[in-house]
Structures are given as structure tokens and as C-alpha cells.
Image (tube, coloured by chain):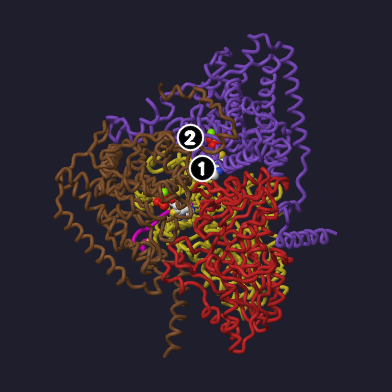
Chain colours: A purple, B brown, C yellow, D red
Amino acid sequence: MTVESTAARKPRRSSSKRASSAAAKPPQSSEPQLVQLLTPEGERVRHPDYDVELTHDELRGLYRDMVLTRRFDAEATSLQRQGELGLWASLLGQEAAQIGSGRATREDDYVFPTYREHGVAWCRGVDPANLLGMFRGVNHGGWDPNTNNFHLYTIVIGSQTLHATGYAMGVAKDGADSAVVAYFGDGASSQGDVMEAFNFAAVYNAPVVFFCQNNQWAISEPTEKQMRVPLYRRAEGFGFPGVRVDGNDVLACLAVTKDALERARRGEGPTLVEAFTYRMGAHTTSDDPSKYRNDDERVAWEAKDPILRLRRYLEAEGAADQAYFDELEAESEAMGKRVREAVRAMPDPDVMAIFEHTHADGHALVDEERAEFAAYQASFAEEAK
Amino acid sequence: MTVESTAARKPRRSSSKRASSAAAKPPQSSEPQLVQLLTPEGERVRHPDYDVELTHDELRGLYRDMVLTRRFDAEATSLQRQGELGLWASLLGQEAAQIGSGRATREDDYVFPTYREHGVAWCRGVDPANLLGMFRGVNHGGWDPNTNNFHLYTIVIGSQTLHATGYAMGVAKDGADSAVVAYFGDGASSQGDVMEAFNFAAVYNAPVVFFCQNNQWAISEPTEKQMRVPLYRRAEGFGFPGVRVDGNDVLACLAVTKDALERARRGEGPTLVEAFTYRMGAHTTSDDPSKYRNDDERVAWEAKDPILRLRRYLEAEGAADQAYFDELEAESEAMGKRVREAVRAMPDPDVMAIFEHTHADGHALVDEERAEFAAYQASFAEEAK
Amino acid sequence: MAASKMPIAKAINESLRKAMENDPKVLIMGEDVGRLGGVFRVTDGLHKDFGDGRVIDTPLAESGIVGTAIGLALRGYRPVVEIQFDGFVFPAYDQIVTQLAKMHARALGKIKLPVVIRIPYGGGIGAVEHHSESPEALFAHVAGLKVVSPSNSSDAYWMMQQAIQSDDPIIFFEPKRRYWDKSDVDTDAIPAPLHKARIAREGSDLTLVAYGPMVKVCLEAAAAAQEEGKSLEVVDLRSMSPIDFDTIQTSVEKTRHLVVVHEAPVFLGTGAEIAARITERSFYHLEAPVLRVGGYHTPYPPARLEEEYLPGLDRVLDAVDRSLAY
Amino acid sequence: MAASKMPIAKAINESLRKAMENDPKVLIMGEDVGRLGGVFRVTDGLHKDFGDGRVIDTPLAESGIVGTAIGLALRGYRPVVEIQFDGFVFPAYDQIVTQLAKMHARALGKIKLPVVIRIPYGGGIGAVEHHSESPEALFAHVAGLKVVSPSNSSDAYWMMQQAIQSDDPIIFFEPKRRYWDKSDVDTDAIPAPLHKARIAREGSDLTLVAYGPMVKVCLEAAAAAQEEGKSLEVVDLRSMSPIDFDTIQTSVEKTRHLVVVHEAPVFLGTGAEIAARITERSFYHLEAPVLRVGGYHTPYPPARLEEEYLPGLDRVLDAVDRSLAY
Ligand SMILES: Cc1ncc(C[n+]2csc(CCOP(=O)(O)OP(=O)(O)O)c2C)c(N)n1
Ligand SMILES: Cc1ncc(C[n+]2csc(CCOP(=O)(O)OP(=O)(O)O)c2C)c(N)n1
Ligand SMILES: [Mg+2]
Ligand SMILES: [Mg+2]
């Protein structure tokens, strides 16, 4: 049956009456097949369309990325508990989705994250300590987006997908063969901006990969409150492909994202990748998931842990020995320590920073207020004398 | 091939390079099959999934609706030329889409139009002269939406699809078996609001029919600037069916909309109907299509005229004779005259109307300004004495 | 129950519960308002008692939330919409200013839009970007809307009752950093009209006008000034649209000095309108120009700077001194 | 070419053309800006000469237009976005206030957002709803934005040049009912700074401040007042953020009377800020409170009522009389 002929085909009628069917069907009822290259047990499986050939070195590299990212994330969570950060949004459980997709990008690609892409930031070479500034409250994003082609975190959900699309339109205009990745969550997928981005990307055939980490939750809302059918299917209605990948399988995430990026580079336009994963922790350190979700679910997902499965594979392959793991453990600890120290040493901004960088070309009112504020501050210094 | 398995299937690669494929493919390149029950030649054809059985009386009724609507529309256009209206948005060419879908609704259904649904308004029983108030500039919509379950015209494109969805959510909550129709255009389909409406309707399984009149143009923009693939396909990615119907075939529009409304009533949720039609005239009386479109296109569509084809069928069926057509002609003229007179007699609103109905419960500032304004107006009256 | 002490968040929660009990048409909609009870727990327990049909966790799309709330209102419901934080109301801004605000007038009064939009607003909670803004002027400037904000638990309770009962759309700004401040609520009281300002403290030397989170700061400033022998009157505005200018005018014509305080940027903030209008009304009474204390014309700064950014006791007293020095 | 007389719409068109010729990074984006040349023909001919790649007809989604323009700016382009009418900017409001206005600060200055958003605004053209609004205060209140509006062809030409050259986002309000008014443009002139007000007419008895479409009304009012022996100074504000208060202050300290005129509703309109700030700056100079003439706190009325709704000569002169009567 071709897609065209479905147009003229009557929607199938269900025999149910409204009373019984008024509630949305749970979208995950008939679980679509995920692209998977590594089973939860660490077994390497083949897929007809996607594959990656990696050396042991490269496999260990992915493993190291995930381990260090998780360690960094844990450190940040504990820094928040110690009062060093105001908030932290943990990526626990999403390491494979982030490292797989992040490592698929090339240096000249450009990445637009949400607020949880610490693993992607790591892949792009952003100093982890730099990510903590906004969570500590010393800035709204401490890095130069152009240094690593990694945009600032965007908190208003979905907005960045349009920026990514526009950026990709610019890439295409420039005739460059780089591509753009826009990250967003299952919850964000409901925003009009995200769908407008899908449409702009399709119409302009922009070289952008929409990478959704479907971690099953948007704070307290499970995906069935967000959408009626699996998200990857949405792409097709805009005229580009959607793929669902096992988001806890770093190899599959790498393969699928690489493929999508190559499509983009070849001028074949956008792809939607839905990485099916799970938010193992709370939404942020301010959140308490016990209010709304059953811990059984989380426990079940523990068996699918992204790091564990790659470790099993590395061990089975003989690609890493205990010495390697011990060394990595030590590197992790050192990294944690370095981050901890960096955060503790992070100075509060000078109060005059309130008035800095509001405009590139200045603004008379800001200048006036800056001067008033400085005089006001000085008056206290005077009094204190 | 099931939908599920496509998830894991690699997008097909085209061999083209970016240079050649950077421009979006014209969406209409592989024209999907339309639901059609009456050919442009007036031949009645069968469709496996959709049908309507109509008496001669009913067929004549549809014909009459279309003829009177067109007559009314022509009258309004000429009233605009005469300066009686500030603007007019003609529906010329879209009579079948509007009458077919409008006549599919039941009295207890609720309709949310854009600004061009004069034919639907007619079906809902709204006095045509009433529609002209806003185009004359005496009000922003002169009718009570609840009298005919026909909402006010909405000018900001797409907004009303959310109102329709919310209304439909309310219908479902009430346990009523009525349904809602939301009209919008091909251009409006790009608005985030419309896509949020699709998603809300899917998630809440709301009894709403999204009826898009794809008249191929959004002012000067053809559909290929708006979307990459035919619009009806967008629905499926949200989890509900989309159907493309011949928008110049009143029988098909009636059958498809009826079917979608029945689905909604049965609690099976939303449907997207894309009525493939053509805007025969200018966008509005302010517009000049010669700036951007080739007249050949319009001429080609003349052969598909919705009224002409039903007339041919009526004649072939012997369902209407010359006397009938003559009588209808006279009725049309009388209607035109009545509308003309009604508009010319339409008084300008009292200036104090500026301050009326801003709030249901009043607002102190408006009260104050009303009083000041009245005093100011009175001062002129004083002076004039 | 009658009088009892409770935090503002709880007072709103009780008020929502009461409204839902009284009228089956009242619905709660928003992100995480269900099982979680909202990120500030303002809707805590309502989902449990009223169920999915009345306490609706929506998809994450603010325009969709407000747009469908409008549709529900057209169908006869009375939706109370929660926007999770001030900075997230803007995706819904079009539906609010273009549809919600204007539809009653568009229909020549033939339809009513009893929609309440609850927005926790303002800073002082050490949050990340977009969680500390005060956008009330962006709504107050728009005809067709009414904009209110309580500063204490009793007003939180009663103003919410009144907002839900009103047939007009109302933007209800909740002072998030005061959510846990406790004060008395008398559920048997007869409340003042929704749009009437309240004299929160009487005084004779200068009038301070504030609303929401700044009322507390102004009351503290008045207490501090008292010790220096200055008697400040504090007006709790309660409504930013319409503004009860009569109450301010009466106070100012007594004190002859006016300082307006809000967290929002001063430039085109509600203080601008109060200054302009009171100056016009009481031109010959004022001994000093109306002074304004508020946010600066900069994006809300990172948390470690917000104490300096937000109007505090010192800045209010500084303005008081400057005013009295005229 | 040097000096020649042309309508405002043409001056903007010429200015866009020049900017596109000078800098290949300048792009035009919007609805119907291509072949049609925009519904007001402001981009007429540009598509023909610069092609699809630089004059981009977009899908009908304002948030998408501004959001992708931001992305293009991040890539080094300088998009000039057209919003078709004032009332249609709100779907893009979130992208404008939350992203465009704040991203430079968020990045501690490390990225620039040279995006111009053109908005034909104001009433007086007999249009249907949403086509006659004046939402400038809703942008001017927002930190991170700059807001300007020309009143004549020369300013239209030069201010557009400056706006496109600026590395900051600029909201460029075009007085649509004056699009066809002709005046001189000297393309060799050295323009005044973008945010500087202009004395459009000198006078000594009272200062009128206006911008965009109301400058003409104020000049006519000044001419009429002249006949009654009153000398009015007219200040063309040109920029609503930042506002050149120095120029207003200088004028007011000479005339001691100020009336601010705009089409937007008075309540929280830019006139409120001007009144508040000038009263503070020039408290002892003012012989009357600053008066404001503007729209009412109602949705913009249907076309047949707009003449009464909009500030016209009579209402301006009435305010002048009231001010001078103090
Ligand atoms: C426009 C907007 N509305 C609300 C919020 C508050 N909020 C922050 S994160 C979040 C949930 C997002 O869920 P999802 O997109 O699935 O991403 P995840 O947090 O699961 O990674 C919400 C509602 C926001 N940031 N922006
Ligand atoms: C949000 C918004 N942006 C722009 C406009 C201006 N506008 C009015 S109609 C129109 C074209 C709409 O095209 P379409 O949806 O295809 O409907 P049609 O006019 O063809 O019936 C545009 C751009 C508007 N009304 N609302
Ligand atoms: Mg999520
Ligand atoms: Mg169209």
C-alpha cells in the first residue's frame, strides 16, 4: 500500500464507544521496534540499515565518555546538595543518547542543546565546570558558543529548535557541508515552536537533525499526556524521516545520528531521531518523583543501563581489562575533584555585571541606570568609612 | 510493511547532491488520489470508502446553497468596489468545500471559521448581511456565536483551531455526542497553534474535525512555500487520520466531513480533512494576484468549477429543469438585492460603542475614559450651539 | 472554618478547592498541576479529589493551554490555568492578548470568557533564568484584561474566589517568593472588591505604593522609617488593571509624597502609569515628583546578583529620603 | 543620487536595497515579501533583483520566522524580518522577548543578534481588526530590545540603514498610514544618531512629543495653534527605547508645558514613562502636569469608529489648552 492511496482510504472504525475510548490510548501500547546494536545484556546485534565499525580504542572512548559524564553529573548533584549550586538537572540514564549523538558530530557541526545536555557538551569539548555557572547562579551560560560550536543552554523548552533550523538554513546558504543538531525533550515536542521548526526545516530542506531524548517524563507528566503516538512518526507528516533508536545503546545512537548527519550533509534535509531512554533521576534537584511515579519503572530501566551494557560488551570482547577500568575510575575521581574545586573557587560576579552585555551597541537608559547604581553603591562605601 | 517496522528502517538515500536538491520538492509532485464522488464533467463515481445517498431534493439543495453563496459573495465584492465595504475576502471557487462540509454539520455541532467561510455561515443559518458588518467596519463580528453555533470570524490565522479543540474537549466532558469543526487554510497550517491543536485534540481524543481548505495560495505564497508534503499526511504523525478530498466536489466534501463527524461523535477523536481546491479570485479585494501568479492556473481550475459540475449532474439525472434554474436565478438576484439594501442601510455605530463590551464586569479605567470622552464630545455640541 | 493562619500557597489551594466544590464547571489546567500538584504545590491534592477530568495535566504548550481554555470557556467551563513560571507565559501571549482579551468585545458582549491565568511571578528565590520575571505591565497595558496580585493569604484566598467568579479573563500574579509566608485567612469574611487597593499601614509623611512581593518590603521600610520618626503610609495596590487611583490619590493628598515600588523594570513599569496619573490628578498637592523604585532595564540577572537587582529595604528608604528632601 | 522626494514606503525600500547591495549577509524574510513585495510593497522589486536566497517568503508562522532569523543571525547573517501587520507580531512575542532580547546578555556578549523586525503599525487605514494596533510599549518595556519609528522619508531611509548596521536587535515600527506621504531623502546626508530625538518644529509655549504617525498630527496642531498665537515645539521622538530624555527635558525646561501624543492606549503607553521621568527631571520647571493624548483602554475599534478613537488635531489642541490653562 503506498502512502498516496491511504489518502483516499477511510479511517478504520473501532467498535468502541466514546465512553470507553475517550481517554487517549497509551502511545507505547504497541512498542515500535527500536534501532538497537547492543542489547541490554551487552550483546552486539546487527541491524539491516544501521551499523558502526569501531576499534577497541573507539569503544573504550565511548565508554570513558559515558563514565566521566556520569561522574560529572553525580558531582554536580552532590554540589547542589552541598549548596554550591542552586539547581542541577541530572542526565542520569541518558548518557548513551548524549554521547552517541554527540560523538557523531563533526567539529564544524553546530549543536543547540536544552538544559540537560552535559554529555553532549563534553563531546563538544566544553569545560564541564563551565556548565555549572548558570546552575550556581553566577551567569546564564558561561561559555562562548562559537568556541565549540555548542550553543548556550536554552531553558524555555523548544525555542532552540528554531534557532537550529535557522542556523542550518544559513549553513546551506553558505554551501558548507556541515550540519546542525537540535536537542529537545519529549515534553518540548508539544510546543508549537518545535513543530514550526520541523516545517521550516522541511520546506527549506535544512541540514538539521532533530534529536529528541524521549526520557518518558516531562517533570511529572508521562509521554501519554504529551502525545498519542510515538514521536518519531511525526516527522513523516512534515516530509522527512523519523527514526526511533534505543537511547540507552550508545552504538545505535552513534550510528543513527551519524547517518542522519550524513543525510543532512548530502543536502537531503532534516531527520528526526527519537532516542527512547529514561530519566533515572528526578527532573531536577528541586523535584520529587515519588509524588508521581512508581519506582518499579525506574528499577526496570536499571537493567537497561547504558554504561553497564557497554562494559559487558567491552569485557566480552576483551577490549578493556581491569587495569583500564581502574584507571578510568581514578580519572573519574580526579575529574570530580577538579570540578568540585573549580566550582568552589568560582567567584560571585561583580555587582556591576547586572548592567554588562545588555546590548552590543549600548543603550542610554542602561548607561544611566548603571551610573545611578554605581553612585548608590558608592554611597554605602562612603557611609561605611 | 507495518508502520512499526518503518521506525527501524533507514531513510532512503537519494543520489542527488545538495546543490540540486536544496530546494524543497514541490509537494504536489506526486498528486495523491483525492476522494471524489463527482468528476469535473459531472459524472457520479463510486469510492470504496465514502458515499452519500441523496434525493433529488437534497441535490438541488446543495446546488442552491452554492449558487446563493456565490451570488452573495459576488454582491459583497461589488459592494466593496462601490465603497460600501472596506474589504472583502471572496470564497469564489471554494463553494463546494464550504457547502459540502457545512451541510455535513448538525445543528448541535459547533463551527469555528476563519474569515472566508461565508458558505459555511450560510449553512449554519447566519444572516449573510450580518457577515458584512466587520468588512464594512461597523463591528468586529456582528452575530451571536451561540445562536447558530457558529463562532465569530477569526483573523489571526490558526488561533481558532485551539478554541475549537478546547470546545470539543468540553463537548466530550459533557458527554454530548455533538462535534466541532475547525476551518483553516493551507497557509495557516504552518502556525504552531494549529499543530498544538492537532496534538491536544489527539491527546484528549477530542471530537473535532480539522477542515483545511487548501486553496493552493496564502496571499502570494503557493503551498510549496508552506509545506513539503501534502497536508493531510500531517495528521497521522499526531495519531489521527487525514484524508484528502476533492474540494470542488460538494458530494465528496459532504461525505468525507460527515464521516469524520460521525467518527468524532462515536468518540474516536479528531480527523484532518484537506479539501483540495483553488482560490479563484484575489486573496481579498486589496490583493492583486497578477503580481505573483499565472492566470493559466486559474483558467485550468475553471474547468473544475464546483457549481458547474453539480449542474451537469443535476441535468444528466433530470433532477432539475430549466424552470428550477430560472427560479433560482431569480432568488439569487433577490438575495443580492436584499444584501445590498441591508448593507446600505447599516448604520454607523454610535461613537460611544468604542467603550462598550470591553468587559463583562466593567473596568474602572474604561468607565473613566468613557465619561471623559462623553464630556469631550458634549463640548463640541456645546460649541456648535 | 473561619479564621486560621496559612501560607499564601495554601490559601490559593483552599480557594481553588472551594471554587471547584461550588461549581462543577471550574477546571484546573496546566503543566504538572495534577499528581505533582504543580511545582509549587499550589494545586496539591486537587487531582486526587477531583480527578483527571477536572485537574488537567496538559501537553507542554502554553499557547495550546490558553487556546483550549478559551474553547472550554466558550463551552461554559471556567478554566483556571496555571503557567508554571512568569518567563513561560510568552508562548501564550498571542492567545492572551489577541483572543482572550478581545473576544468578548469582538462578540459585542455576546460571549463571556471566565478564564483565570495564574502566574507565579517575581524573583528572590535563587532560580535560573526565566523563573524570576515580573511581566505584569505587559498585561496591564492590554485592554480587555484585568490584572491582580495578592500580597497576603487572605487576599490570595479571596481574590482567587473573586477572580474565578468573574466573567472576565483575569491574569492572577502570585508572589512566588511569598508562597510560604503565613497570615490569617477568614473564610467567612466579606472581602473587599477585587480591584480595590488596601491601606496596609497608615502614615502621614509619604505614601508607598506596592503590590505582591513588594508589599512586605514596603511594610518593613515603613517600620524602619518609623524608628527615624517618619510616618509612611503603605498602599497595597492589589490590582494593576484597573488601578484604584482614588485610594492612591486620597493617600497622596494627605502625605504629599509618593514612591512606587515594584520588582519589574522601572521603564514603562506600572509605576510609570501611577506616577503620570497621580501627578495629573494631584499636581498641586505633590511636594516632590513621584519616585519609582524597581528593576533595572536589564534582563533579570543570575541568582547571585538578584539581591542587588531587586528593590530592597535600603533602596526603598533611599527613595523615601530623596522624596522627603524635596 | 543625493536628495529627492519620495514616500516613506519607497524610502524604506531604497534603504533595504542599499543595505543588501552593501552587505551580502543582509536577508529579507517574511510573509509575501518576495514576488508580491509585501502587502504594502515595501520590499517591491527586491525579490526580482536579489532572488529567493536573499528575499525569503516564509511559511506563515511568525514565531518560526523570528526563531529562524535568530539562527541565521547566529550563523552570521543580518536578517530583516517583516511582520505583516502589528496585530500579528504576538505569535513571535516569545521568541522576541525571551530569546532575541536576552541572548546577547545570556552569552555574556559573546554572540550578536543583528536582527531588525519591521512592523507596519498604527491605525487610520480603515482596516479590519488586528491591522491597526500600536504595541510599541510592549516592546519598549523589555530590556534587551531597541525600539524606533520614523515619521518621514529621510528618517525612514537613514534609520533603516542604521538599524541594519546595528549589532543589536531592533524593532522598527513603520507608520503604515504615512507610507505614501512624500518628503525629501538625501542619501548623501550624514544622519543623526538612531536614538536621538529631533526638534521637528521650534516653539516656546508648550512641547508636544510624538513619534511615527502622530508627528504629522502634532505639526498640524502646532500650525493651528500658531494661528491662535500659541507657539508649540514639536519633538519627534524617533526612538521609544532608549528615549532621548535630554532633548525632551531641554525643550520642556524652555516651554514648561508638555503633552505627549501617541496612538497606543494611554494606560502604560510610552507617554506614561515620559510623563513620569520628565516630571522627575524637571519637577520645578513644569507649570502643568504632563498631559497625555492617546488611544483608549479598549480594543482598537472597528474602522468606522477609528477617527474618534485616534488622537486627532482637536484632541491634541484640547490637551494643549488644558495644559496652558494651569
Ligand atoms: C515554555 C516552557 N514552559 C515550561 C517550562 C518548565 N519546564 C522546564 S523543563 C520542563 C519539562 C520538559 O520536559 P522534556 O521536554 O521531556 O525534557 P526533560 O526535562 O525530560 O529532559 C518544563 C515543563 C519551560 N522551561 N519552558
Ligand atoms: C498570525 C497572522 N499572520 C499573518 C496574517 C495575515 N494574513 C491574513 S490571511 C493570510 C494568508 C492565509 O492563507 P491561508 O491560511 O491559506 O488562507 P486563505 O486566505 O487562502 O483562505 C495572511 C498571511 C494573519 N491574519 N495572521
Ligand atoms: Mg522528558
Ligand atoms: Mg490558502
Can residue C89 be seen in this snapshot?
Answer: no
Q: Quadrant of the N terminus of chain D?
A: bottom right
Image x and y of residue C173, in percent: 53, 55
Return the residue at label 2: A239
Image location of residue B74, percent across then percent down: 31, 60
**Left or right of residue C113, residue D277 in this image:** right
Classify mark 1: helix, strand or loop.
helix
Residue D195 place in picture, x, y as percent: 69, 64
- Give the overall secondary structure of the magenta segment: loop
Label 2 secondary element: loop
Near-viewer residue (D265 or B67): B67
Q: Which mark is residue A196?
A: 1
In the depicted view, which residue is nearer to us: B296 or D240? B296
Residue B11 at x, y percent in the picture: 51, 26
- At x 75%, y 17%, the residue is A327
Q: Residues within 10 Å of mark 2 (few under 14, many from 20)?
A: many
Residue C291 vertical placement versus A323 (above, below): below
What is the quadrant of residue A129 in the picture?
top right
- Chain ID, mark 1: A
- The amino acid type, in three-letter code, at marker 2 is Gly
Task: Determine which quarter of the picture holds residue D145.
Answer: bottom right
CA–CA distance in space, label 1 to label 2: 13 Å
Question: Is A194 colored magenta in this rendering?
Answer: no
Q: Amino acid at mark 1?
A: Glu
Residue D220's place in the image compared with C137, above or below, is: below
Mark 1 nearby-residue class (10 Å; few <14, some 14–19, many ≥20): many
Task: Return the residue found at the far bottom.
Answer: B385
| Residue stretch in magenta | C107-117
